[in-house]
Image (spheres, rainbow, N blue to C red):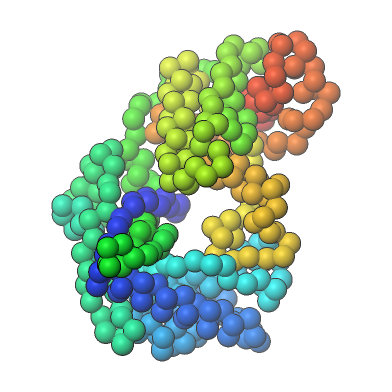
Amino acid sequence: MTYITLVFPFNVCCDVAKRFLSTAWLFKIATHRLFNVVRHFPVLPATDIGWKNTFRGIAYEIIPNRRYADGVVTLVRSIYESCRQLRIDFKSVELSDWLMFQQSELEYPARNITLRSGYELHITTVDYNKKTYRDVVKPTIPKSYKPLLDKMLEERQKYTGRVVIKSYGIRKDNLWVRGEIHITISTDFYYKHMTRYRESKGGLIGGIDVNVDRLNLAIIDEKGNLRDCKTFWFSEAVARGFSKRSARSIIGAKIHEMLSYAYHHNVKKLFLESPEVLGKLKLLWVRNGDRKHENYNYKKAVFRSSVIEMIMLKTPLYGIEAKYVDPKGTTNSEEHDEAMKIYGLDRHIASAYLIALRGLRNQ
């Protein structure tokens, strides 16, 4: 089963802010402690249950809550598995600079980060004296997501949660914390209640080339003839100093605009470049000398992969099937130059055309 994470921003102040910070710091300290233990452990368990049974106690000593302790174990294991997948030496990586806490179990209701009616979340927090509290937060919920949250409560949909601290500071002598609440649910449930259109009745094929400031769509027929093309720009979203939250909203809106355009132009299937497998390392829980975030090409690859994943996630909402193709040769090749010359395309639209063509050939 696959899952999707919904992200809702929030602000809290005063004592609640203190407890959010203390919980996040305890979670981080526990993660660092366990991370160091695991790096020197001779033989690691092979199963999720084995990891929790072996390492839960180490995390629990620091953050005395079973679900958060298991969340620490799950996070460290995900880093280990990502390193294996990427063939990176697990002992060489370091944890990056983040503040968050999570529970790992999918359950209804999630005990530590609990969705309630009225779009409230009741969150278990722990202060530095290891005393436990239940704090209530009302995050900003987009109008389009409120029916989905209502259905989660109505159908008792299992979910899990995470709280990410984005920033904190003093304002008018009060401590404020700005963050995000992440709610993870199954993609099947998400598509069941969020689909905007019925299955497309058209028979055309679309190819998408993702660039750092635009989405390029090329539409072809079953014979491979170019029928239409269009570029969807989001230049302002990648300008220096532009907030990540606003950028994500703008890019998301452009993705919806592009998918709506494809649907209304009879596209039945969309093909995208297969993104590099980055695992959870792309979430920046860790840093590694071989993949420095300061490196432009690395940041560009992560950005493009994240946009491609957003498109793959949202495409079924429009009744369109989405698949990956091997991008090799879609940017620099004789076929690419020929497509530019024959159809008078720029290099990005030509790449989108070749992606669509490759998808057509590999159906």
Quadrant in which residue 339 is drawn: top right
Task: State the quadrant of the C terminus.
Answer: top right
Left or right, 220 with reference to 50: right
**Residue for point 72% across, 23% down:** 347
Where is residue 209? Give x, y as percent: 62, 30
Name the spot of residue 361 as percent of width and height, x first: 68, 26
Report which quarter residue 157 is drawn in: bottom left
Write the residue at 64% across / 13% down.
226
Name the spot of residue 219 as percent of width and height, x first. Answer: 58, 18
Above or below residue 116? Residue 233 is: above
Q: Which quarter of the rendering shows the N terminus?
A: bottom left
Identified at 77% across, 32% down, the residue is 329
Task: Note whether residue 330 is visible.
Answer: yes
Q: Residue furthest right?
A: 334
* Quadrant in the rendering for residue 37: bottom right
Q: Residue furthest left?
A: 118
**Above or below 72: residue 281:** above
| Observer-nearest of 154 and 169 | 169
- Left or right, 205 with reference to 192: right
Whether residue 105 appears in this view of the structure is: no
Q: Residue furthest front?
A: 172
318 to 305, vertically: above or below: above
Q: Nearer the viewer, residue 290 or 205?
A: 290
Number of marks: 0
118 shown above or below 352: below
The residue positioned 44% from the left and 83% from the top of the image is 59
Q: Position of residue 131 (x, y in %)?
A: 26, 84
- Judge by depth and name the residue closer to the eye, 62 or 362: 62
